[in-house]
Image: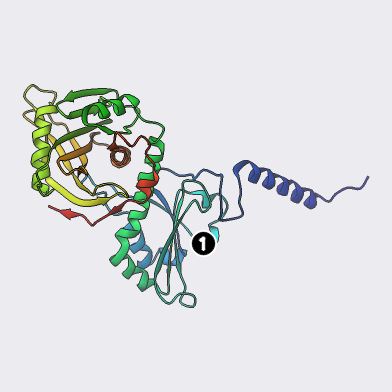
Amino acid sequence: MQTIPVMKQLAKITLLLATLLCTLIGCTGGGGSTFTQASGKPNEVMLVMDRDLLADSVGRAVKEMLRSYVPAMPQIEEQMDVTTVDPTDFDSFLRYVRNILIVDIDAERYSKNSVKYAYDQWAHGQIVVTIQSPAPDSVCALMQDRGRGVLNLFVRHELALQASNLMTNFSRQADELAVKTIGYHLNAPEDIVSYKVGKSCLWLSNNAMRRRTDMLLYKVPYHGEALTMPYLVALRDSVLKANVPGPIEGSHAVTAPHILMTRQVAIEGQPLRTELRGLWELRGGGSMGGPFVQHAFVTPKGDELVVAESFVYHPNEAKRDIMQQVEAALFSVRPDTVAQWSADEVAQVRWTAYTTY
C-alpha cells in the first residue's frame, strides 16, 4: 500500500474542511448573492485601512467621524463602535461583519475622492462603504465636507436592520390599538405590554423598571401651522400633561429645554416628516428622564397632524441601541389601508441636516 506524505495528507484535510465550511456557511467567492448572515454587534463598524495611515491624522479623522456623538442624549455616547484592520489582514470571516468601511488611498489609481456603498456584498444584512482617494489630505477634507453623510449610511443601515426584525417580531396588540385609536398601523417592539387609550391618543410601554421604552401616538386637527420646534414642543407638552402622568400624584412628563434638534425625514411614497429630538423629564415631582425622538406629518388630506414618538428611561446606562430600536418603529407608522411594511423604506430614507436649538 502506498503511503501519502504527511504534508499532502494535511493539505487534503485542510481543503476538505474548507470545502465543508463553505458549504455550511454559503461561501460565494466574493461578491454576488450570499447566504451567510452578517456578524457583529449593533452599531459596530470595521475600518479597513493601512495601519500606518490609521495611526496618522487621516486615520484619526476617519475614526473621529465614525465616533461622532449620538445627537440629543443625556450623556456622551459614540455613534459607532470602531474596530480596525490592515487590508492585508482583511480576509476570511472578517468580511462577514455587518458594517465595513474601506479607505483606499492610491495616487496612481485615483485622481479624486469617491464614496461607494453596496449591500450584502459578502454577507446578508451587510453594508460595505468604500472611500477611494488619491491622498490622505483629500480624505481629511472629505471627512470635513461629507463625513456626516458617510456616517449616516451606517446609521441608516442599523435602523433598517432593526426595522427588518420589527417586520415580523412586533406587538400585534399595540398594532391593533394603534389602528383603532388613530387609524394608523404601528410595528412596536414585542415587549410592549401596557397601554393607555385617550382621545385620539395611545400611550404604549414595556413598563420596565429601568430599561423602559414608551411610545406615544396621537392625532390632532391641523390648520396649516408650520411644524416648527416651538409648535411641536408646545403640542407635545400639552399631550404629555394630559396623558402621561408621573409616579407621584400631580407629576407628568415634559420636554426638557436643554437640547432640542429638528430635521426633515423623507420616506418614499409618504408625506414629508419633521423629526424632533431631545430630552424629557418629570415636572411636579420625581427624577425620571431620558432621550426621545418624534416624527410628525400632515395627512394627505391636509386636515390632521399625526405624531408618533418614542422615549426611553434607562438611568446611568447606555441608551443608543435601545433608542435605535424604538426609533426604527416610528418608520412603520402608516395608514390602516397599508397592511404591509418593508424595511427597504428605512434603508432608502433621506434626512436633512439637523437644526439645533
Q: Answer whether residue 46 is visible to the viewer in this image.
A: yes
Residue drawn at (10%, 36%), measured in percent from left and top?
237
User: On screen, 169 above or below 90?
Assistant: above
Residue 7 lies, in percent from the top left, at 78, 52
Residue position marked by numbered label 1 in the rendering: 87
Q: Nearer the viewer, residue 329 or 140?
A: 329
Left or right? Give the position of 280 relative to 70.
left
User: On screen, 272 above or below 312?
Assistant: below
Quarter occupied by the N terminus: top right
Residue drawn at (38%, 64%), measured in percent from left and top?
59
Give the total number of marks visible in the rendering. Answer: 1
Instruction: Identify the secondary structure beneath mark 1.
Output: helix
Which residue is situated farthest in the front direction here?
301
Q: Nearer the viewer, residue 185 or 319?
A: 185
Residue 33 lies, in percent from the top left, at 56, 50
Left or right? Give the position of 318 relative to 91.
left
Q: Amino acid at mark 1?
A: Pro
Q: Answer whether residue 158 is visible to the viewer in this image.
A: no
Q: Nearer the viewer, residue 116 or 72?
A: 116
Residue drawn at (79%, 48%), measured in percent from left and top?
9
Q: Nearer the viewer, residue 146 or 287?
A: 146
User: On screen, 340 above or below 209?
Assistant: below
User: On screen, 328 above or below 48?
Assistant: above
Which residue is situated farthest in the right direction here?
1
